[in-house]
Amino acid sequence: MSATVDPAPGKTPSQARRRKPGLVGWVVNRVGLDETMEDQYNRVVPRHATNYIYCVGGVALVLFLILAITGILLAVYYQPTPDTAYQSVLNISTHVQFGWWIRSIHRWAAGGMVLLVVVHMLRVFFTGAYKAPRELNWLTGVALLGITMGFGFTGYLLPWDQKAYWATKVGTDIAGSVPFIGHFLLVSLRGGEQISAATLGRFFALHVLVLPGVIIVLLLGHFWMIRRQGISGRL
Ligand code: HEM
């Protein structure tokens, strides 16, 4: 079947060409996807920005998407209580089909994302891309770095093994040493004075609900600003 459609009254030929038949075409026309995509296709990437170092932020985004998908799969089997957490992680690694694989991808992607976000930040710094008019995007980036670290910190406790316990103890002790608000931070993070079931519950909620929500909002802001301002010029 031909994809061309008779021009509707009052439509220019190029508007008519964009109209597609069928259900997909109906939806595409209603949401104006063609116009949006045309805008994307017509953007020119400056030559200097095709250098690999300018792709690091994009690869960090791909790793984030991989983390989101593998994280959802892990959450299907993970059980966030002190009695079951360790056993459920063991079960994922030994009994669940491809569980060891999904878990390994999640762990390696997590490490990779921290590394790439830092490299991306260094690229932005050394190319001076933090200067006007991109200061706000730099600050959004600083928040993104904090959130990325937060994912690592909260995720580390979830296996509920000795390493996880002691790393969280040291991490929350450091938070507790912040002047004036230290004790408040420590108790808020641990859900009490000691590391307990409440800590595990809080870290799980932060890891799978709060931080993903915040990072999605920040990423949308980050990309919106990049779209508006374009990639910074050659030095
Ligand atoms: C989750 C973490 C992050 C992701 C996924 C991300 C993604 C991106 C992408 C795809 C770009 C387009 C150009 C490029 O890739 O170099 C970009 C640009 C930018 N990013 Fe990030 N970013 C992240 C974190 C950061 C951090 C930590 C900073 C700095 C503190 C930062 C500051 C900026 C700035 C200022 C730009 C504009 C650069 C320019 O115009 O040359 N971003 N980011």
Image (spheres, helix red, strand yellow):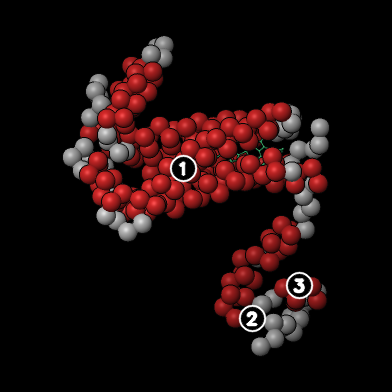
Q: Nearer the viewer, residue 182 or 93?
A: 93
Q: Amino acid at mark 2?
A: Pro
Can you tell which quarter of the image residue 133 is in? top right
On screen, residue 95 above or below 20 = above
**Callout in the foreground (2, 1):** 1
Q: Amino acid at mark 3?
A: Gln
**Helix, strand or loop at disc 3?**
helix
Where residue 15 is drawn, which disc sits there? 3
- The reply to whether dot 1 and dot 3 touch (C-beta < 8 Å) is no
Image position, residue 79 (x, y; %): 25, 46
Q: Earlier in the sequence, mark 2 or mark 1?
A: 2
On screen, residue 12 above or below 73 = below
**Callout in the foreground (2, 3):** 2
Q: Is residue 219 left or right of residue 214?
A: right
| Residue positioned 44% across, 48% down in the render | 105
Residue 4 in view, yes or no: yes
Dot 2 corresponds to which residue?
A: 21
Disc 2 from disc 3: Cα separation: 14 Å
| Residue positioned 75% across, 76% down in the render | 17
Where residue 108 is drawn, which disc sits there? 1
**Does the numbered disc 3 mark a residue whose Cβ is under 8 Å from ligand 1?**
no
